[in-house]
Image (spheres, rainbow, N blue to C red):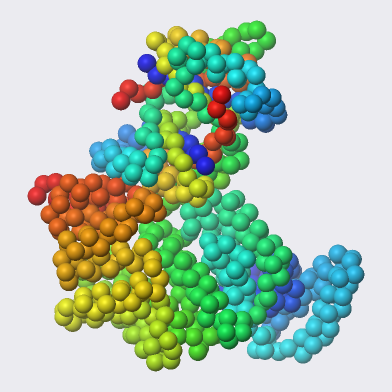
């Protein structure tokens, strides 16, 4: 077997089972960084021995065995009494595990995700940590998607893993009474990764991130099939993803929802989203992601049927606002209110945000203000808001769209 | 007219110069600052943290790249600046000569575009 | 935390920039001002600069540009932000990121005299 073929096999295994192997290894020692090192060494050994010895029948089990040995060695090298005890414990496990067959490597990825979304980890680092441990993305790739300097992202990941160890975070699925709250943190991290990929549509790294987030969402639904919010979040991501091909015209220009060619929507993805949402609503209480998915469902139905759906959307935003008190919801509700009560009422509903310092550099706030003010005939305010929104845009297509709206207002 | 004095120097050496007075500056710089202020020439001035703390962004073909460090690796690093008011370029060069960094680095003097 | 945002322009790219660049810049300035940043400072081209260095009692004067490089320092903005992440966000919004490199550097606080 050639080195190239060995590398390809190793890469395929890496993509399929990286997170599964790492979760298993990390759960043994509660040391993510150490487990990563051990797994990296196992992959390096594979590249050395597979070309001459051939790829083993069960590459996962082979990698796991090598990585476990490395982990045990590393613990032994530390030479302390506690390490000695840990070493004996690992040896015992190793004997137990020796009986493991390929299919029976326990899937501890959900437990690893819970650890990554542990309260000791700052919320902004939970998504990067999950992307690295479950998917094996490099710090450089994650940094590019999150627009963070690579060294900064690398340092933060190292710090987060150290914190996990110090906090003694359990690599376990929380008890029933804690589950919902802790699951929220996992879902929030995955959705944050998706949102990065959604807003920065021109970015290759970010496009890929959206796909990875959906993959993670599917994983959570598979591993926690009784959790309606997990289904709600996956549905929400799929509704958005289904519309991705329609968000740009042939010239790469931005197309808003109400002008999108619905023939370009991915109907299969929409059907999957609908059935997930249906299952979620049937199975459990209504949470944030289920409501957001229901709003997307209403938008899709409204566009496809041509029947007005805005009253339902406004009502859903009211429920969501009650639940989250989020300024983003206030903003989205305003856009819906413009369709039911008119632009003046919609603008008035934004008054509560005007003094919020977080809005100063929040592009969607100024874009929404611009659209609403233009509809309300407040030309000066609309021009100013559009101008600020243009200045805050990082996406070229969206910038051009806003500039066109601004020009239309100036000429009109 | 306004001019920018850009201080380029070996940042490691600049780091090793221990600040000794209450302003957090070396006495040389404190004296230079005082002179600028007294002459009514001081508009602004800042010292930068080392280039290791920098990040750079460039966008090409719609792709945003974020890099660690400054945009270029150079023998001397940009470490701080002054904005000064001076009647002409020669007067600005006189200030540059008095700037302590001219003795171990290079002072670049650039006219500011009048708005 | 104070940050300096340094603009480095590639003359060739800048010469080919569409006229809309200056409109984009006006919008960027307004957005930055709204968020509490200072308006920027533009410099005359690097070739119009001079430089001075003194060693062992000898003074050397040069005519610009100080550095022979594809991209030249062209101006800067100052911003007060919670962390470098926010600074990088602003750098990505800066129209010059498409015609050169936008660098962000944290300022070293010195106490007022």
Q: Position of residue C94 (x, y in %)?
A: 38, 43
Q: Is residue A263 left or right of residue C8?
A: left
Q: Going by the picture, which residue comes out furthest to the bottom? A: A282
Q: Residue at x 27, y 77 (%)?
A: A315
Q: Residue at x 49, y 39 (%)?
A: C3
A11 or A192, which is in the foreground? A192
Taking A103 as reference, is A402 above or below it? above
Taking A290 as reference, is A33 above or below it? above
Q: Residue at x 83, y 80 (%)?
A: A89
Q: Is residue C63 left or right of residue A362?
A: right
State whether residue A154 appears in this view.
yes
Taking C64 as reference, is A401 above or below it? below
Q: Position of residue A179 (x, y in %)?
A: 56, 82
- Quarter-of-image position of residue A298: bottom left
B40 or A361, which is in the foreground? B40
A158 or B42, which is in the foreground? B42
Q: Position of residue A297 (x, y in %)?
A: 30, 80
Q: Residue at x 61, y 26 (%)?
A: B23
Q: Is residue A336 left or right of residue A214?
A: left
Viewport quadrant of the N terminus of chain A: bottom right
State whether residue A239 appears in this view.
no
């Amino acid at each position: 077997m050639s080195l190239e073929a060995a590398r390809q096999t190793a890469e395929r295994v890496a993509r399929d089972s990286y997170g599964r192997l790492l979760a298993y290894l990390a759960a043994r020692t509660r040391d993510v960084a150490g487990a990563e090192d051990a797994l990296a060494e196992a992959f390096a050994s594979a590249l050395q021995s597979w070309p001459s010895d051939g790829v083993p029948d069960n590459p996962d089990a082979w990698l796991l065995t090598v990585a476990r040995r490395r982990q045990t060695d590393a613990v032994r090298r530390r030479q302390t009494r506690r390490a000695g005890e840990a070493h004996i414990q690992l040896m015992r496990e190793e004997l137990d595990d020796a009986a493991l067959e390929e299919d029976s490597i326990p899937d501890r990825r959900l437990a690893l995700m819970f650890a990554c979304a542990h309260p000791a980890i700052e919320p902004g680092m939970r998504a990067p940590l999950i992307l690295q441990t479950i998917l094996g993305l490099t710090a450089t790739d994650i940094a590019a998607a999150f627009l963070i300097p690579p060294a900064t992202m690398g340092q933060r990941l190292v710090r987060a893993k150290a914190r996990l160890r110090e906090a003694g975070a359990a690599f376990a699925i929380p008890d029933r009474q804690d589950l919902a709250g802790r699951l929220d943190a996992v879902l929030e991290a995955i959705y944050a990764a998706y949102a990065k990929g959604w807003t920065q549509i021109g970015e290759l790294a970010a496009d890929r991130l959206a796909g990875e987030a959906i993959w993670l969402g599917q994983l959570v639904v598979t591993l926690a099939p009784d959790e309606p919010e997990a289904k709600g979040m996956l549905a929400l991501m799929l509704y958005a993803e289904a519309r991705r091909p329609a968000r740009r015209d042939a010239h790469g220009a931005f197309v808003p929802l109400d002008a999108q060619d619905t023939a370009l929507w991915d109907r299969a993805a929409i059907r999957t989203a609908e059935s997930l949402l249906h299952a979620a609503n049937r199975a459990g209480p209504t949470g944030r992601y289920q409501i957001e998915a229901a709003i997307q469902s209403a938008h899709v139905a409204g566009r496809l049927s041509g029947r007005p759906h805005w009253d339902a959307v406004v009502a859903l935003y009211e429920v969501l606002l009650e639940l989250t008190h989020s300024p983003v919801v206030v903003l989205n509700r305003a856009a819906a209110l413009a369709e039911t009560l008119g632009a003046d009422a919609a603008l008035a509903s934004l008054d509560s945000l005007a003094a919020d310092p977080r809005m100063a550099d929040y592009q969607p706030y100024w874009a929404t203000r611009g659209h609403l003010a233009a509809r309300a005939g407040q030309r000066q305010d609309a021009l100013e808001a559009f101008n600020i929104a243009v200045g805050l845009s990082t996406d070229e297509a969206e910038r051009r769209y806003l500039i066109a709206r601004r020009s239309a207002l100036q000429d009109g | 007219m306004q001019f920018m004095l850009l201080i380029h120097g070996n940042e490691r050496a600049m780091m090793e110069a221990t600040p000794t007075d209450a302003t957090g500056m070396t006495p040389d710089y404190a004296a230079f600052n005082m002179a600028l202020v007294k002459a009514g020439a001081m508009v602004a001035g800042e010292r930068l943290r080392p280039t290791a703390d920098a990040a750079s962004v460039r966008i090409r073909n719609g792709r945003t790249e974020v890099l660690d460090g400054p945009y270029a690796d150079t023998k001397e690093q940009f470490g701080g600046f002054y904005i000064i008011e001076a009647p002409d370029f020669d007067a600005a060069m006189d200030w540059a000569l008095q700037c302590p960094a001219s003795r171990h680095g290079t002072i670049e003097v650039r006219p500011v575009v009048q708005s | 935390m104070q940050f300096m945002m340094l603009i480095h322009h590639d003359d060739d790219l800048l010469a080919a920039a569409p006229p809309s660049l200056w409109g984009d810049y006006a919008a960027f300035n307004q957005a930055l001002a709204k968020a509490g940043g200072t308006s920027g400072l533009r410099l005359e081209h690097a070739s119009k600069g001079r430089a001075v260095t003194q060693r062992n009692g000898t003074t050397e004067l040069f005519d610009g540009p100080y550095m022979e490089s594809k991209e030249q320092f062209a101006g800067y903005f100052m911003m007060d932000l919670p962390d470098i992440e926010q600074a990088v966000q602003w750098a990505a919004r800066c129209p010059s990121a498409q015609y050169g490199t936008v660098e962000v550097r944290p300022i070293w606080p010195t106490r007022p005299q």
